[in-house]
Image (spheres, helix red, strand yellow):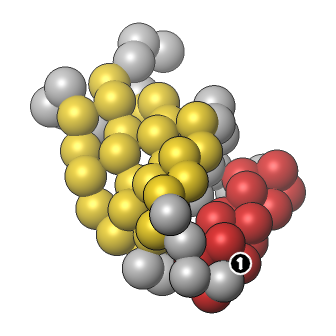
Amino acid sequence: MKICLIVDDYLPDSIKVAAKMMHELAVEFNNQGYEVIVITPSDKIKENSNIFYLDNIKIIQFKTGK
């Protein structure tokens, strides 16, 4: 089963507690056998989108303004 988390603040761009907690939730879902994708904005990327993995979690960032 797949789970998509759409959040406004996520690692590694953020150091806020909420971002860390969302990552811990995603990792726990992954540990339970779910395929997890996180979609989050970023004002730090130059291209329109960026896809990478962090702790086996697929993260899709999309470009936003500041």
Q: Position of residue 2 (x, y in %)?
A: 48, 58
- Left or right, 19 with reference to 58: right
Name the residue: 28% across, 62% down. 52
- Left or right, 61 with reference to 40: left
Where 46 sits versus 53, above or below?
Answer: above
Where 53 sits versus 56, above or below?
Answer: above
The answer to whether one can see residue 42 in this image is yes
Regarding mark 1 in the picture, which secondary structure is present there? helix
What amino acid type is highlighted by mark number 1? Glu
Name the residue: 63% across, 86% down. 31
- Left or right, 7 with reference to 41: right
Q: Which residue is mark 1?
A: 28
Q: Which is more toward the observer, 11 or 31?
A: 31
Q: Position of residue 12 (x, y in %)?
A: 52, 60
Q: Quadrant of residue 37?
A: bottom left
Name the residue: 63% across, 36% down. 7
Q: Quadrant of residue 60?
A: top left
Q: Which is more toward the observer, 12 or 52?
A: 52
Q: Position of residue 11 (x, y in %)?
A: 57, 58
Q: Position of residue 50 (x, y in %)?
A: 24, 44
